[in-house]
Structure formats: structure tokens, C-alpha cells
Amino acid sequence: MATSDTDLVEAVDLDELRADGRALVSADGTAIALFYHEGEVRAVDNRCPHMGFPLAEGTVDDGILTCHWHHARFELSCGDTFDPWADDVRTYPVEVRDGTVYVDPDPPREKPPAEHWAERLETGLEENLRLVTAKSTIGLLDAGVDFAEPTAATLEFGTRYRESGWGRGLTILGCAANLFDDLAAEDRKRALYTGARHVASDCADESPHFDQPSFSTEAVAFDRLKSWFRDCIEVRDADGAERCLRTAVAAGHSEAEVAEIVFAAATDHPYLSTGHVLDFANTAFETLDHVGWAFAGDALAALVEPLATAARSDERSAWRQPVDLVALLADVYGGDVTETSGLEALAREGEGQTWEPPAGFRETLLSDDPEAIVDALTGAIREGARTEALAAAVARAAATRVAQFGVANEFDDWNTVHHTFTYANAVHGATRRTDAVELYRGVFDAAMNVYLDRFLNTPPTPIPDPGDEASGRDPDRIREDLLGTFDREGAVNEAGRLVAEFFDCGGDPAALKRTLGHGLLREDAGFHTLQNVEAAFRQYDRAAPRAANGRTDDGRETARADDAVDERTRRIPMIATARYVAAHTPTRREAEQTFTIAARLNRGETIHEG
């Protein structure tokens, strides 16, 4: 084609276009569909924005262009769609000169890409449109937008349009944000898409949440707000609890103080809603780490409904029979599971002391004697163990249950050990945010659940010791083989073995994370699988390897239980999560299909062949 003296490109003879009604041209590499309709010449991108079908093969009638594949309809002159799931099609300026049609193949866009895709993300969330959401999340990151911005927009949407409060979708969004730095560039887009689509799905057909305002005064003492909040949650008064929590945020109480309020209520009864409530709370705070405390009011208020309606494990027979675990813990806490006076007394005894886990401490946590477990934990507090150190030790024991889960068990029992692990990880995360004495209760609760899960390790699947799997193989090849286990059903033990082999060959843990992250995000990964991988990464990161001289690799003294562990213990969460992912894959990978189509459409590729 010859180029005119403007930005226009010669496209087609007007008489030919009038006679045929349409023409397909390529201008500067862009496939453009030209239409002659009602005396006007119109030009649009030939690729339907929905699935890439050639619009030149569509139908034009009454000013409407209809794609023949999924019947998406577009206003021909401006390209706007009648069907939000299809997205708008791009139009191009045309000009007729001396019987020839010219087209501008690269006109300036009406809005910058970041603004355009942010608006489309909102539409995708509002109408639960997966393809629109995928195109938007990919477009935003390609436009250089910081991951935190669309995460914040999705967080706002999820807290506003879900009356039942914080749920699986927002937890997945938080897990995706936590995983972001561990992922390859393309998988970061998958992570954002995964979080956004799950939030949209969670909010679909839900009633919106109508906020309860903070109190008109901000002069209420912290201890009183904390007491009021706990009392409201105890009697399941969600409205009153929300006002207390919003007041705490509005009054400018520190993040640690607000966390203390929330986590105290979340541990007033053991293992609320199979551990999900405390896990939700921890993820909410972690999400705020990414998007900023300015979103705290709405984000934390979304935790109130799950707290107020939670199922309480002290009302479950498993916690009462054959051993009354509730009574056992109440004796430690101060006479009731909601008390802390006994824990405060133990902590005072340990003031000024430095605790190191005694020999056999891990084995005790994994034993079948709940009294011995409680005694070991109370003795540790008396000897100076802080909540964070004990939470780290219990989280490692919980990870061991997943790593040693026997595949002869029922499939649903994977989630039993999973819930304990992610709960213990959440308690550990909470202890790093506040040193509130109430979190000792979370430690004990997690430890009791590790005890209750003991039969799922009967017999235990062996965990390879360092060196057992050494073969001198290429770590990159091992990672390829690991991905291969996710393509086959039942390759659970092989996946765990390959992770051990990877470490034995000196593989880079960051590369292993990228592989596990990719294996996770290409699947239709559910709530639990995403949680499991994210928790495993955090537990691995928080445990620095212990050197032979009693210092960590960077030379620090080992002062806390989670400062340094032996290599066998440190790798357990990674082995555990590889086994868990392998047990839950392969899936249909429908989300990956949508993501791939969206990525190709955004790149301008031809999707439909033929």
C-alpha cells in the first residue's frame, strides 16, 4: 500500500468497498475490517475482542456489527459493545479522497493504557467476566502499573460487595500478593488474575455490605475497645463489633494494637471454623502490608462477620472426646478457654530468660500424648519462650503432618492436615505482628490440632534426609520433572522426593519457588492449594539454616526457635507443599486457557485460524 502525505494509509477503492460491503486490509501490520454501511465507511480491528474471530466475516445491520462466533454485538461507528463480556472493539479513523479510502492504523488512544485497563478491571469484577478480568490484569502489569494498585482496587471491591465479609476470594487475593515476588514475570500476571477472578466469583450475586460507622468519639481507651470488641464477638453481635473495630482504626491506634484486638477475639475460642477465621485475619493484615494501611477500615471490618458467625471447636466432640482438650487448655489459660491470666503468669516467670528448644521438643509436638504436648509448651513459656518462637515450632510440626501424610487415607483428609498447617502458619504470622499474650492460645490450639491429626501419619510417609536423594543431576532437569508430576494423577510421593533431590543437588530455592508457583498458577487452583503453597514459602523463608557453629548462615547468633533450624527441618514445608499440589493436580486448566487467550489478544495475535 502507498502511504499518503498524512498518517493515513491507502486501503481500498471506494467503489469496490461499496459493491462488496466490506474489505479486509492490512495496514502497518494491523488487520483492519472496513465496512460500507448506510453511506458511511467504518473501520474496526478485525479481531473480535472477545475471542479473536475475524469481524470481517460478521454481519452489519442497523448500525450494529455482530460477530458470528459468540454473537457479540458492537456499535459500528464507535466500537462500543452491547455485551460487556465481549469488551469494546477498537475503531480507526478513515478518510475518502478521490474515490480511495484511507485509514489511520495507529490513532492516539482516548485513554492511557493504565486508565483504560483499570476501568475494564472494575467492569470485570462487577460482572464476573473472566476474560475481561484476565485482559485487564495482564494489561495493567504490561503498562507498568504496580501490582499493589489493582490489588487495592480488587480489595476495595471485595469488601464492598460481599455482605458476608472476608472469604475465600479475598484470601486468595492476599496469598497472590504474598507470592508475587517469588514468581516469574508471566506468573505474576497469572497471580493477579487468579486473585481478581476469585474475588469476582465470590461477590457474584452477593448483597453489598453496608458499613457501620465508627463511634463519634475517638477518646475510648484501647483496653476498653478491645474488651468491647471481644464481648460483641462473643455474643455474635457483628454490628457492634464493627463499630468498635472501625473506631480503633479511626482513632489512630497502631497496627500492632489493632492486630491485638482482632487476634484476641480470633483466639477466644479454639480453632474457629476449622482455622479459617484466624487465617483470614492474618491474610487481611498481610494484604494491607501490600496496599497500605489507608485501606484498613474496610478490610478489617470485613473480618467481623466471619468472626461473629464462626463455628467454635470447643463445641465439637473431637475436642471433647476421648480426651477433653478444652478442659486441658482451660487449666493453662486460667479456668476458661477465653481467659489469659494463667498464660500471663507463665510469661512473667519467663521474663528475662532466653529459650532454646530442648532435645526432643519437635518429637513431643508430634506425639500422641496431649498432656505431654501441653506440658512442653507451658514449660517453654515458663523458660522464656515468646509467642513467635513457639508458633514457629508448631508450624513446622504441622508442616510435617502434610509432608508425612499417608496416601492410603481418604482424599478429603488432605484438607485436615492442610487446615492445621495453614492455621499454624497464620498464628506464626500474627505473632510477628503483635506480641499479645492471647496468641499463646493460638499456639496451643494449633498444637492440639497437630495432635488430632496424628492418625493421618499412620504410617508416616518417610521424609528423605539430606543426602539421601543426592544424584548429581541437573537441578533444572529436576524442576522439569517436578512440573511433570503435576501432569499426572497420583505422583504425590515422587513430587516430595524430587524436591528433596533438588535441595541435595544444590538447587536455588528461588528457582524452586518459581517452578512451584508456575505449577500452581497454571492450574484451576482452589482456595486450599493456593493457601498451602503460600504458607510453605513463608515457613521456608522464616527458617534460616543453622550452621555447625550454632549461628545462622549470615553469622547471627541463634536466639529464637525460628531463627535457625537444621537443613532437614527447613526443607519440610517445600516437600509438603509439592506433595499437596501433586495430590490436587492436574485440573482442567480452564483458567489457564482464558489467561492464554487474553494474553494473545493483548499482544495483537491472531486467535482464530481458518
Image (cartoon, rainbow, N blue to C red):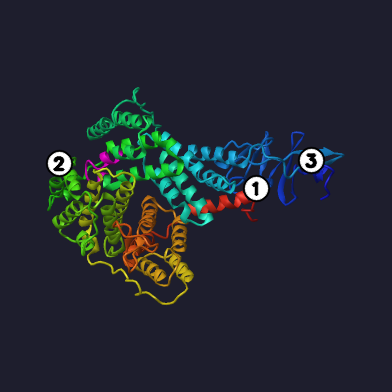
Q: Could you say where residue 70 lies in the image, as x and y percent from the top left?
A: 57, 45
In the picture, the disc for residue 336 is 2
First in sequence: mark 2 vs mark 1:
1
Q: Is residue 271 magenta?
A: yes
Q: How many numbered dots are placed on residues in this image?
A: 3
In the picture, the disc for residue 18 is 3
Marks 1 and 3 sit apart, C-alpha to C-alpha, by 22 Å
Q: Residues within 10 Å of mark 3 (few under 14, many from 20)?
A: some
In the picture, the disc for residue 47 is 1
Q: Could you say where residue 90 lies in the image, as x and y percent from the top left?
A: 66, 41
Q: Could you say where residue 227 lies in the image, as x and y percent from the top left?
A: 24, 32
Q: Disc 1 vs disc 3: which is toward the camera?
A: 1
Q: Residues within 10 Å of mark 1 (few under 14, many from 20)?
A: many
Marks 3 and 2 sit apart, C-alpha to C-alpha, by 85 Å
Q: Disc 2 vs disc 1: which is toward the camera?
A: 2
Q: Disc 3 vs disc 2: which is toward the camera?
A: 2
- Label 3: element kind: helix
Q: Residue furthest right?
A: 98
Q: Residues within 10 Å of mark 2 (few under 14, many from 20)?
A: some
Of 608 and 388, nearer the camera is 388
Q: Residue at x 44, y 68 (%)?
A: 507
The amino acid type of the residue labelled 3 equals Arg
